[in-house]
Image (tube, rainbow, N blue to C red):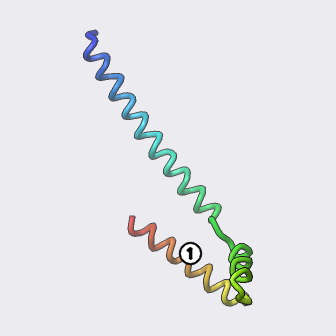
Amino acid sequence: MSTGIWILIVIVVGLAGALAGFYGARKYMEKYLRDNPPINEDQLRVMMLQMGQKPSQRKLHQMMTAMQQQARNSNKKK
């Protein structure tokens, strides 16, 4: 096998591995963030208390629903 073909094979395999790794890591992170959302109701309650607002359960639920809807809409756009 000539040196040129050997170098070409190494480059193609390296690119294929990089692409597979990128997409594998991307899918893993999407699943992780879907299963473990970055914010929950308790964190939202603490944020509202720090801002000087008194959060009601209804307001917390509305905000969480709005955030989840926004996340679904942004996923559909991609």
| Front one among 44 and 24 | 44
Residue under label 1, please give it.
68
Name which residue lies at 37% across and 33% down: 15
Corner quadrant of residue 16: top left
| Image quadrant in which the N terminus is located | top left
Residue 71 x %, y % = 51, 71
Corner quadrant of residue 20: top left
Kind of residue indicated by mark 1? Gln
Residue 14 x %, y % = 39, 29
Q: Report the side of 74 relative to 10 (left or right).
A: right
Name which residue lies at 66% across and 89% down: 59
Name which residue lies at 45% across and 70% down: 74
Most extreme residue toward the top is: 1
Report how many numbered discs are placed on residues in the image: 1
| Front one among 55 and 40 | 55
11 over 35 or under it: above or below: above
Name which residue lies at 51% across and 46% down: 25
| Image quadrant in which the C terminus is located | bottom left
63 over 25 or under it: above or below: below
Residue 45 x %, y % = 72, 80
Corner quadrant of residue 58: bottom right
Q: Which type of secondary structure does the marked residue at label 1 adopt?
A: helix
4 over 32 or under it: above or below: above
Q: Residues within 10 Å of mark 1 (few under 14, many from 20)?
A: few
